[in-house]
Every structure is written in C-alpha cells, then in structure tokens.
C-alpha cells in the first residue's frame, strides 16, 4: 500500500511539474527594456554627512524649492507606533515599523517581547513619547533589543 501511494504521488508531481513547465513561456522584448532603461533619470548617490538635511539633499539632486519654505523629512508617526505596540506588541511589529534590525525583530518574536515585559515597557515609552509630543526619532533604526537603552 505504501508503494502505491508513493508511486501515485510521484506520478502526480511529475505530471504537475511537466504541465506547469510547458505552459509558461516568457517573451523578452529587448527594445522595450532598453527604452525603459534609457528613459530613466540618473540620480547621484547621496553620502550622508553631519550637515545633511532635506534641502541639502534636494539641492544635490538639482531640485529647487522655487521660494517654498524648507521642509524636513518627517519621521515615523508616534501614534502609529503606539497603536502597533498596543495590539501587536508581543510580536514586535512596532519595532519593525520603527526600523529595527531584522535579527532583533526575530528575537523579539521568539521571546514574545521578553515574555511581555519588554513589550509592555516599549508601550509605556511610546505612550510617554506620544503624551509629551516628543517623537520617536531616538528609537528609530535602533538595533538593540531594549529600544530605550540607547543606540
């Protein structure tokens, strides 16, 4: 009986593989690809410095603000991070939103936010940042497991 099941599953996989492989054909249009690549705009790479701001980056790209007030790049929304921490804190979704390192996020998921303790402290820290209107820029892109421990 085992041999029959094994042979029938191998036959099934063979038939499915052959049928899928024979139906998918790709046509490459080299002219269209070259036209798309040539119509793009080349952008100079931006090397971050201590003085880099949104207006400096725009000037490096050749973009002028035409008399408009200078704007800065907005950081992540504190309320969004707080809500994510409230509902999905144990999974560390708020940490991924704030740009934590991947391995830190995986560790956060595997420990369920430090058995809920680290997730709760993250929630309190985000609540304080939300109430005081501080922003969460100091917690963004933080590779440490304890985000309030500094960079």
Image (cartoon, rainbow, N blue to C red):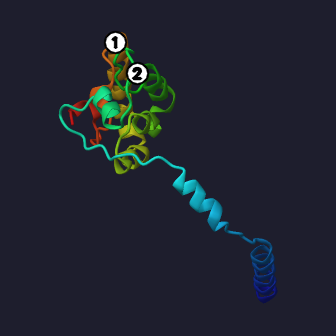
Q: Residue at x 38, y 49 (%)?
A: 102
Image quarter of residue 25: bottom right
Quadrant of image for the N terminus: bottom right
In the picture, the disc for residue 78 is: 2
The crowd level at tag 1 (other Cα within 10 Å; few <14, some 14-19, many 20+) is few
Closer-to-camera residue (115/142): 142
Q: Residue at x 36, y 37 (%)?
A: 61
Quarter of the image where one finds residue 22? bottom right
Who's the residue at 80% across and 73% down the image?
23
Residue 63 picture location, percent across and down? 38, 31
Residue 112 versus residue 67: which sits nearer the camera? 67
Label 2 Cα neighbours within 10 Å, binned few <14 / some 14-19 / many ≥20 = many
- Contact between marks 1 and 2 (CB within 8 A): the answer is yes
Give the residue pinned by disc 1.
Answer: 133
- Residue 92 position, x and y percent, is 43, 38
Quarter location, residue 115: top left
Q: How many marks?
A: 2
Q: Residue at position x 80%, y 79% from top?
A: 12
Q: Which numbered disc flags the more N-terminal residue, 1 or 2?
A: 2
In the image shown, does 29 or 66 lie closer to the viewer?
Answer: 66
Does residue 33 appear left or right of residue 127 in this picture? right
Q: Which quadrant, please, contains the C terminus?
A: top left
């Amino acid at each position: 009986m085992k041999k029959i099941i094994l042979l029938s599953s191998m036959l099934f996989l063979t038939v499915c593989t052959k049928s899928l492989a024979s139906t998918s054909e790709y046509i490459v249009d080299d002219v269209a690809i070259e036209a798309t690549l040539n119509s793009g705009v080349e952008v100079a790479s931006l090397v971050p410095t201590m003085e880099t701001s949104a207006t400096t980056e725009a000037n490096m790209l050749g973009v002028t603000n035409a008399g408009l007030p200078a704007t800065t790049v907005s950081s992540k929304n504190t309320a969004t991070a707080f809500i994510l921490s409230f509902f999905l804190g144990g999974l560390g979704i708020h940490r991924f939103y704030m740009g934590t390192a991947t391995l830190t996020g995986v560790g956060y998921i595997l420990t369920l936010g430090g058995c809920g303790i680290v997730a709760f402290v993250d929630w309190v820290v985000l609540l304080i940042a939300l109430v005081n209107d501080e922003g969460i820029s100091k917690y963004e892109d933080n590779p440490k497991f304890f985000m309030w421990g500094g960079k």
